[in-house]
Amino acid sequence: MFGLDALHLARVQFAFTVMVHIIFPALSIGLASYLAVLEGLWLRTGRSVYLDLFRYWLKPFSLTFGMGVVSGLVMSYEFGTNWGGFSDKAGPIVGPLMGYEVLTAFFLEAGFLGVMLFGMQKVGPRMHFAATCIVAFGSLISAFWILAANSWMQTPVGFTVGADGRFLPADWGQIIFNPSFPLRLPHMVIAAYLSVAFVVGATGAWHVLRDRGNMAARTMFSMAMWMASIVAPVQVLVGDAHGLNTLAHQPAKVAAMEGHYESQDGAPLILLGMPDDKNARMDWEISIPHLSAVILTHSWDGHLQGLKDWPAQDRPRADVLFWSFRLMVGIGFLMVAVGFFSLWLRWRQRLFDVPALLWVVVAMAPAGLVALLCGWITTEVGRQPFTVYGQLRTADSVSPIGVAGVGTSLVAFVVVYVLVFGAGAAFILRLLVHPPQPGEPEPAPAPMHAAGITPHQPLTGEA
Amino acid sequence: MDLPLIWAALIAFAVLSYVLMDGFDLGVGILFAAEHGETERDVMVNSVAPVWDGNETWLVMGGGGLFAVFPLAYATILPALYPAIIGMLLSLIFRGVAFEFRFRATSRSGRLLWDISFGLGSAGAAFCQGLTLGGLLQGIHVANRAYAGGWWDWLTGFTVLCGLAVVVGYALLGATWLIWRTEGDLQQRCRGYARALGVATLALIVIVSLWTPMLNPRFSERWFGWPGILLTSPVPILMALLAWRGWRGLAHGEVAPFLCALGWFVLCFAGLGISMFPLMVPPDISIWDASAPHSSQAFLLTGAVVLIPIILAYTGHAYWVFRGKVKAGVHYH
């Protein structure tokens, strides 16, 4: 199915660059909010453990933020280099949404990031806390606009099509608040929060396992488990609503997620099986009768469309969606289970005493990110073979670039990303295997300037 | 209201802001080629660390803005200059991560590796931006709303010269920035670099300026025809005045050389505008041809007129917080 033509190489390149990129903003969104909470708690309670945790997590945050900036810059130009057809036709709608992202979010984050990372002693704690909150808020605004753009591509409304094939905006309110946006946005933001909760929880668990008395480690583990107990179940509900929304607007995508090739009443929930897109049938199927109909239509004999209702060239790939969706959902329920178990242990006052839970949480460090990537694979591959769903085919979206050009740049991106972001991941892991200490040092060698507020306390740093 | 014209001015403002601001911090990276001391390199990086991310956001604004309000330009320029754009992006990755990574590296060789990544990334990004500028000026072949030229069109003597000019020009911005923001031996050496780079930049500007009108008869008509020459003749005169003032400042001045170097870039940019206007993608596509529909431009403009002044205000605040000479700071390891 994937030949070595320029279209497929361009798709692989976009998939690769965007999947690497999304990891960093997801971590930045979650960590920025977490840092704002930690700094707020420190200012409110005066307990130094929160300041220690703030400084501890500021270092990985600044690494992920920097990697997000440079990998995001690639995205903002890749639409033009590789997807000229899409840019020309859909630019009038998607472009201004991204323009607003730059104007309202990127500048805001960049304008206060310097103060957040280096400015504690220059501007004082209150202004510094304001900067942290602004950066966290900026990351959420950014999510708002990029998800509005993505959701419009999934469920396009509020436009007309011009004689030259361009999408002409008719109603910006409809375009931004398109049908899938109100669910996609919270689903993604919660996913980012949960991803970070499990990274933080795993780090805390690791250090509690090595030193039960480490107060900062206990605090971060406990905070992460509150997130798993409360936010993970919320995510299941939001995800369910999002699925029903997809059924209403993109039924072919749901059919592929469920592995339903045949249209049927009272469709079974296929737990496991081997989708065969070529022959449009499910092999080795293990299923529960009627359950899919009950979940999706809330009726025992509800009707669900199968993939065969669409012409073969209009179907998304069930062999990808079936698995990516199951992996995401499976991880989601595992998180809920961990959350409930931790709640029970907390009630028994044994939260830090059960090594099994600590080890499970350590193992689940990447779980949130894996689920998040699976969710994006599900929704994006499920949009195929269109870039703007039902309106503009992927094949008509690509730039007139030859195989050699796209292939060379793809290889270059893979090599550079593996080297650079691999090194970045190693730096982050190295920071996280160090236990958080009382009097945690500042994140970076704070640039000293002659003017401005003179530091009251000596700069802390590893000399 | 002529929205395409307003937007062309705003995009030009974004690109100029980018060149002026990221220009000096890329220049600081390019000067890693001359400065090898660990302390000096730390000071150099620290002088731009709190602001580089904001500077680079103007590049996203330029690209994203083009996508939003001149999608045809975005959809034809970027494929035409594909290798230069990809090269720029990859270079910016290497230098962008180096800000953090060079302080995280534990071994001397690891640190050296990220210093090289910072220096070469900065130089590579500058060179690719010059290629892009040259490629745009020499013209892009478009048919049926898509790039219709060849794979190597962007690589000519002219584009390579432009690439070189941008590298040298950014290095000049970096050197004059460091004169302003550092002191002692490093500042003295930067005065020396700035002299050599100033002469080289001026020479390259002259060559590019003489070559450009030969690329397209429209350009030469604009520069040497009547009444265009009334508009164009002040440009070289102002260049010379700034050169004289900046050269004097190099002896003992603090901020004057930097301001004069920025002035050169503003003038070059104005010259570029004089050549290109009203073309968006030479030789055929005008500002109006490349425009997004009215409602797209109006929608984004509503936000831009409110937000751009606010952005400039808090960007100014960030520069103000980190004002003053950068001292040799605390070492991390």
Image: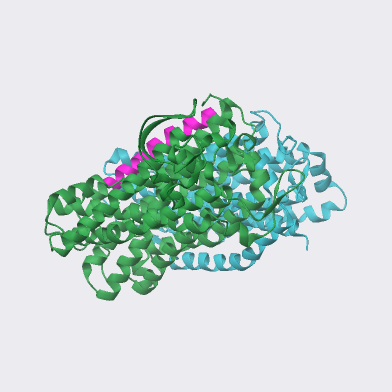
Q: Nearer the viewer, residue B220 or A90?
A: A90
Chain A drawing hue: green
Question: Is A424 colored magenta in this rendering?
Answer: yes
Magenta segment, prevailing SS (helix, strand or loop): helix
Question: Is B25 colored magenta in this rendering?
Answer: no
Single out the residue that lies furthest toward the front.
A301
Location of residue A81 with respect to B331 vertically, above or below:
above
| Figure disc tally | 0
Q: Quadrant of residue B116?
A: top left
Q: Is residue A23 at least partly visible in the picture? A: yes
Q: Residue at x 50, y 49 (%)?
A: A246
Q: Residue at x 50, y 26 (%)?
A: A278
Q: Nearer the viewer, residue A229 or B142?
A: A229
Horizontal side, residue B283 vs residue B10: left or right: right
Q: Nearer the viewer, residue A410 or B109?
A: A410
Location of residue A433 with respect to A130 vertically, above or below:
above
Colouring mode (rainbow / by chain / secondary structure / one colour): by chain
Q: Residue at x 16, y 64 (%)?
A: A347
Residue A226: x and y in percent read: 26, 61
Q: Nearer the viewer, residue A189 or B327?
A: A189
Residue A293: x and y in percent read: 43, 46
Q: Quadrant of the N terminus of chain B?
A: bottom right
Q: Is residue B44 at least partly visible in the picture? A: no
Residue A90: x and y in percent read: 65, 47
Residue A434: x and y in percent read: 21, 51
Query: Who's cyan, chain-wise?
Result: B
Q: Which residues are magenta?
A: A407-429
Horizontal side, residue B7 vs residue A14: left or right: right
